Amino acid sequence: MSRPLEHSRGGLPDFGWTPEWERAFAAFAGPGLEPGRVVSGLRRKFHAVRMADGEALGRCPGSFFRGAEEAAAFPAVGDWVAVRRRAGEARAEILAVLPRRSKFSRRAAGESGGEQVVAANVDVVFLVEGLDRGPDMARARRFVAATLAGGAAPVTLLNKADLRGDAGGALEAARAALPGVPVFLTSAVTGEGLEAARGFLGKGTTAALVGASGAGKSSLVNALLREEALPVAEVRAKDARGRHTTTRRELLALASGAALVDTPGLRELRLWEAGDAAERLFPEMSGLIARCRFANCSHGTEPGCAVRAAIEGGGLSRGRWEEYLRLGVAAVPARVAGRRGRPREEECGRNAWRARCRAAAQNP
């Protein structure tokens, strides 16, 4: 996607600036410094930054690279930053990132698997699932887990409802699979569900749309903006895969005073951490674990294992139990893992999760 740098007009309040952020910036204030918000990620060094009187090309100087210990410390879309603009130029130096209040993160691809911040300082994360080829509830639960772990509120949008004859049945199934998470049917074509989504976009709120390629995120953004701000493309019919219409993350201002982050499609979501999402999304597990004969049951070969009995008796599917375990391992922040790769990381996660299971059995 190619778009002009000055892509949305308005002052800082239109991009989420509040008295709380003004107080937070006071700790970074200095001669020539002013606040700005990262509205687009261009390269690791360069970001489009919205300031009080316009937009500038922000650059992280060498000192930033020397001070940042990990990739997640660099600015991400949605971050508030302290910048010093260059005289006579639409350029600025990004000198500090204000402490984040929330984030949506994933584990980066590759062997190192560090944290990648997809969007920062978001209040709501809209998890978009396309009904033309889904929804995939296992994927939706991972997105919910990442949202909760990052401190934001998840909302699931079952998009392209106009293409699904049994959309009502899909809605009921999704609400049952995602307890406590608001779920709505949406369609950028018919307008269904858009008012429900706008209900989460009050003044000063920042929301992000995340999901797989082809789920219709950009079409929803255009519908919420009530203008064609983002290009869209059809999903390939032969394999129902999206075409990555959105190629970089961008933050846009809405007429309501909210800000909205559109993100490229995520073909996979490797969890960075999951918090207590496993207990929230699988509420039956803690009671089941508490019925095991032994408090330190590993749910393998021990006699009196209530989990194994439930699986063998058909009361619990093995797939659901394994998904619960995967979320449980992810609940342990990846930063506690060893530095030599994933095997050590998984071992640390499993050991910590087993300790959690034992605690749940002892204190049902």
Image: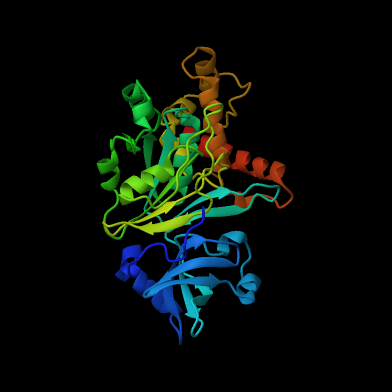
Residue ID at (61%, 49%): 108
Instruction: Answer with the quarter of the image where residue 232 lies.
Output: top left
| Residue located farthest toward the bottom when viewing the structure as drawn | 31
Q: How is the image coloured?
A: rainbow
Instruction: Judge left or right: residue 266 versus residue 178.
Output: right
Count of labels shown? 0
Instruction: Answer with the quarter of the image where residue 271 lies.
Output: top right
Residue ID at (61%, 60%): 71
**Whole-percent x and y of residue 90?**
48, 76
Residue ID at (32%, 48%): 224
Q: Quick one: 70 or 248, which is closer to the camera?
A: 248
**In the rendered image of this protein, does residue 194 appear above or below residue 61?**
above
**Visible in this render: residue 151?**
no
**Whole-percent x and y of residue 197?**
30, 44
Q: Quick one: 72 or 32, which is closer to the camera?
A: 32
**In the rendered image of this protein, does residue 28 appear above or below residue 262?**
below
Could you tell me which quadrant the C terminus lies in? top left
**Visible in this render: residue 347?**
yes
| Residue located farthest toward the top when viewing the structure as drawn | 313
**Whole-percent x and y of residue 289?**
49, 28
Instruction: Judge left or right: residue 210 versus residue 322.
Output: left
Q: Quick one: 331 or 60, which is closer to the camera?
A: 60
**Whole-percent x and y of residue 147?**
44, 46
Residue ID at (46%, 35%): 140
